[in-house]
Image (cartoon, rainbow, N blue to C red):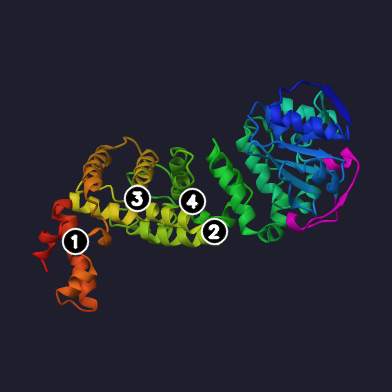
Amino acid sequence: MVTREYKINLPKDVEFILKTLHQHSKSSYLVGGCIRDILLGFEPKDWDFCTDIEYSKLLDIFKDYSPKEIGAHFGIIQIKINDEHYEIAKFRKDIGLSEDRRQQKIEFTSSLEDDLKRRDFKINAICYDGEKLITLSEEHFDDIENRELNFIGDFRERLIEDPLRIFRFVRFLVTKNLHESMDDIFYCKPWVNENIDIIKRLSKERIRDEFVKILLSDSPTVGLRELNNYGLLELIVPNIKDMELDQKNPHHNSNVKQHIFRVIRACEPILELRLSALLHDIGKPSCFTIDENGVGHFYGHEKVSEEMAREILTNLKFDNKTIDIVCKLVGNHMNKSHRQTPKAMRKLVNRVGIENMQLLFSLMEADIIGSKPPYRFKDLDNMKILFHEISKEQEDNPCLKVTDLAINGYDLMKLGYKGKEIGDKLRELHEIVLEHGSKYNNFEELLKYC
């Protein structure tokens, strides 16, 4: 074990927890991500503690701070101070190997060294006692100073312990800006190739959570390229290998995958937006045709991409709301024609949802930026102007959905409509309102068409 004198100005509540722990055991520390982030120049998101104090005693010490057992098996409690949550863990070490970290067998220990050895990366195995930094060797400090990412011990053992660590490896490279200093970031690739079946047995939820963090990072395409180089991206987007397709189209100077990466890079870090950027053209290979002039076309690819996107996101266990928004964006990203009319815009807003239109415009803009220059934004700008005008009319009298109509099914029943006739008439009236705008959405006007 090595130490370095170091002073961290801790938040008041964090300092209180550490001092409280020290009253019962000096072998109590801040550890892991919070210390790593401070040393790398990032603002910590969470503050985690480790100690040799027994689990039951921890519950008693912090009984006035809503202690919650979030892992009795792992010796972890969560406390709440001033609406912030903090985790305190008993020193532990792993026993044996597990294909899923959630099933890992552990043994409580009084040794800080054992606890640090069980962690994944050297930069994550540094703790702080309030006065000095403590870790296993100088190499851990070197990795911080050199902004490098290395596993503790033999990387093969760390990956067997938890195969998800290969995704975490890529995630830390891009979220902590470590990729630029790494000379060789493919040294794990042979292990991944040999153990891909073990990786495939990881839960979809765990893979998804790591992938989302990569996708929302400041360098998403770097992360995607690393996942692709490791053969891991196809576990998320199964047909990613097909994306090497040459588009043979004058509007593109890159293959489909390169275009997709450019679009992602042009998008803000909003989950639904970057997911739609990733998936907006995945249907292109199956729609590819070449005309008599040798020009490539992808007619209807947006609808095929929408279907594939729904399957991919469902497989990754995304929530229904996210899936619904992404699929709407993917399925409508080609609606940037110069022939847009108020009726067409109202129909588009009806399909996508008025609350999702800004995301759609952002995707369309990124799609243009990801294509071959010169960039033509005129049609998109006209669409935005038209949408603004329609949005204003919706504020006073919404008319985008059938349920917004001033006439409903009960009114039609009173007029003598029955069964299927009611639905047909409501859809007909809705078309009229979409055509002419909210000025037609009043009872007397619609009654003329009944």
Q: Find out whether residue 104 is within the magenta segment.
A: yes
Q: Residue at x 45, y 38 (%)?
A: 268
Marks 3 and 4 sit apart, C-alpha to C-alpha, by: 21 Å
Q: Which residue is mark 1?
A: 431
User: Looking at the image, is 15 positioned above or below residue 60?
Assistant: above
* Crowd band around label 3 with a 10 angstrom C-alpha radius: few (<14), some (14–19), many (20+): many
| N-term mark: 1 or 2 | 2
Checking the image for residue 244, the label placed there is: 4
Q: Residue at x 22, y 71 (%)?
A: 410
Marks 4 and 2 sit apart, C-alpha to C-alpha, by: 13 Å
| Residue 352 seen in the current view | yes
Quick check: marks 3 and 2 in contact, CB under 8 Å?
Answer: no
User: Looking at the image, is 406 positioned above or below residue 35?
Assistant: below
Quick check: marks 4 and 2 in contact, CB under 8 Å?
Answer: no
Q: Which residue is mark 3?
A: 333
Marks 1 and 4 sit apart, C-alpha to C-alpha, by: 42 Å
Disc 1 marks a residue whose amino acid type is Glu
Marks 1 and 2 sit apart, C-alpha to C-alpha, by: 39 Å
Quadrant of the rendered structure where residue 376 is?
Answer: top left
Q: Position of residue 13 (x, y in %)?
A: 70, 31
Front tag of 4 and 2: 2
The magenta span reads: 94-120
| N-term mark: 3 or 1 | 3
